[in-house]
C-alpha cells in the first residue's frame, strides 16, 4: 500500500477523505498533521483525533501544525461552510487521545528522512506545514515521494471569490513555495472537484448503507449540503478533499497537464493559481514562470469513476 500522511483542516470533506483513506486498502495512513483553514489549528487537531477514534484508529499519530499562514496573519475559519465545530455542528465526542509530541513540520521532516522516496503527503488544507518543512529541510522536496494538493482553480472561478480557491487563499505564499519546490506535486483544483458531485440521493444512499461510517458521514454532511444549496443552488455537495484522496489512490482517473504554476500573493487576485500552458514566453526580464520546476495539474476527471470509488 502507498504510505501517506494526511495534512488536513477537518472540515467536513476532510472528514470524508480521512475515513475514505482508512478504508482504502491501496493506502497506509502513517499519520495526520493539522492546519488552520476550515477551523483553527487547535480545533483541527481535536477533530483529527476524534476522526481517528471514530475509525477505530487510536494508534495513528496526529501532529499539530502551524496556527497561521507564512504571512503571520490571523486566519478566519470557514464556520459558515463547515459549522463552528468544523463537523457540521454535530457536537462530536471529545477525543480521549492527545496530539503527538512533535509539531507537524518536525513530524513531516522526520517521516521523509526516515523513509525517503516512500511517503506521499495528501494536503487537504492550506499547505503552510509543507511549505515550512520545505523551507527548513532543503532535502524535503526530493525525499517526499509525492505531494497531492487539493487547491487552486484553473481557468475558472474560485470558491472564495472569482480569483481563488479557499486552501490557496488561506496561504498563497505557502502554495507558491510548494509549487516551485521541485517536489513531485499533483494539484487537484476546483476545476475538476466541482465536477465530482454527490447528489442528495447519493448522500441518502451513503446514510442508508448500513455501515457505521455511512451513518456518520450522512449526519456530518447535512450542514455542508445546506451551504451548497444556499451558495451554489446545488442539490448535493462538491467532493473536494475525497477527490484528492482518489488522485492519491489512482491518478489515472484524472488527466494531468505538466507546467509551472505560480500564485498571486497579494492584491485583487490574491490566491489566484496560474498554470503556464507552455506557449512561448518572453524569457528575460524576470518572468516568474521561467526556469521554475513544474507540477502536474488535473485538467480533466473521470467524474463517475471517482464518485464510485468515493461512494464505495
Ligand atoms: C477546500 O476548502 C475547504 O473548505 C475544503 O475542506 C477543501 O479542502 C475546498 O476549497
Ligand atoms: Ca480541507
Image: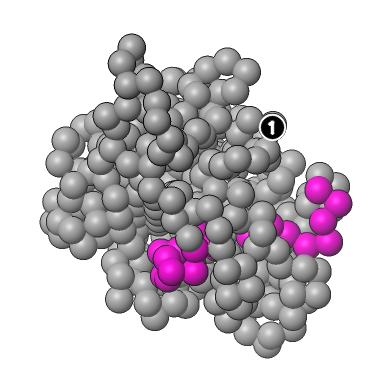
Residue at image coords 59%, 23%? 269
Residue at image coords 62%, 18%? 268
Residue at image coords 40%, 31%? 280
Q: Quadrant of residue 238?
A: bottom right
In this orientation, which residue lies closer to the viewer: 61 or 254?
254
Does the numbered disc 1 mark a residue whose Cβ is under 8 Å from ligand 1? Answer: no
Answer whether residue 237 is magenta in the image. yes
Q: Residues within 10 Å of mark 1 (few under 14, many from 20)?
A: few
Q: Is residue 120 left or right of residue 21?
A: left
Q: Is residue 280 left or right of residue 166?
A: left
Picture layout, residue 17 above or below residue 148? below
Q: Residue furthest bottom?
A: 210
- Residue 155: percent from the left, percent from the top? 60, 40
- Residue 101: percent from the left, percent from the top? 28, 48
The quadrant of the picture occupied by the C terminus is bottom right
Q: Is residue 62 visible?
A: no
The quadrant of the picture occupied by the N terminus is bottom left
Q: Residue furthest front?
A: 280
Q: Which residue is mark 1?
A: 162
Extent of the magenta region? 232-254
- Residue 17: percent from the left, percent from the top? 53, 63
Answer whether residue 242 is magenta in the image. yes
Q: Quadrant of residue 302?
A: bottom right
Amino acid at each position: 500500500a502507498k504510505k501517506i500522511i494526511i495534512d488536513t483542516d477537518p472540515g467536513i470533506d476532510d472528514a470524508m477523505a480521512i475515513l475514505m483513506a482508512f478504508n482504502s486498502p491501496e493506502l497506509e495512513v502513517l499519520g495526520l498533521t493539522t492546519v488552520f483553514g476550515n477551523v483553527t489549528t487547535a480545533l483541527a487537531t481535536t477533530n483529527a483525533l476524534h476522526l481517528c477514534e471514530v475509525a477505530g484508529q487510536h494508534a495513528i499519530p496526529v501532529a499539530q501544525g502551524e496556527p497561521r499562514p507564512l504571512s503571520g496573519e490571523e486566519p478566519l475559519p470557514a464556520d459558515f461552510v463547515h459549522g463552528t465545530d468544523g463537523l457540521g455542528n454535530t457536537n462530536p465526542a471529545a477525543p480521549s487521545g492527545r496530539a503527538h509530541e512533535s509539531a507537524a513540520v518536525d513530524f513531516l521532516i522526520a517521516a521523509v528522512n526516515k523513509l525517503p522516496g516512500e511517503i506521499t503527503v495528501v494536503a487537504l488544507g492550506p499547505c503552510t506545514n509543507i511549505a515550512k518543512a520545505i523551507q527548513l529541510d532543503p532535502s524535503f522536496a526530493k525525499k517526499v515521494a509525492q505531494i497531492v494538493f487539493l487547491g487552486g482553480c484553473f481557468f475558472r472561478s474560485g470558491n472564495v471569490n472569482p480569483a481563488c480557491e479557499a486552501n490557496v487563499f488561506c496561504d498563497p505564499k505557502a502554495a507558491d513555495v510548494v509549487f516551485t519546490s521541485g517536489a513531485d506535486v499533483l494539484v487537484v483544483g476546483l476545476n475538476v472537484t466541482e465536477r465530482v458531485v454527490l447528489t442528495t440521493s447519493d448522500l441518502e444512499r451513503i446514510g442508508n448503507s448500513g455501515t457505521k461510517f455511512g451513518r456518520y458521514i450522512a449526519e456530518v454532511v447535512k450542514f455542508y449540503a445546506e451551504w451548497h444549496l444556499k451558495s451554489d443552488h446545488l442539490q448535493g455537495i462538491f467532493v473536494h478533499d475525497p477527490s484528492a484522496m482518489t488522485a492519491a489512490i489512482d491518478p489515472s482517473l484524472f488527466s494531468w497537464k505538466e507546467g509551472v504554476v505560480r500564485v498571486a500573493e497579494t492584491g485583487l487576485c490574491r490566491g489566484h493559481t496560474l498554470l503556464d500552458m507552455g506557449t512561448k514566453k518572453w524569457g528575460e526580464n524576470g518572468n516568474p514562470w521561467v526556469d521554475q520546476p513544474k507540477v502536474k495539474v488535473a485538467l480533466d476527471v473521470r467524474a463517475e469513476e471517482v464518485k464510485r470509488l468515493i461512494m464505495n
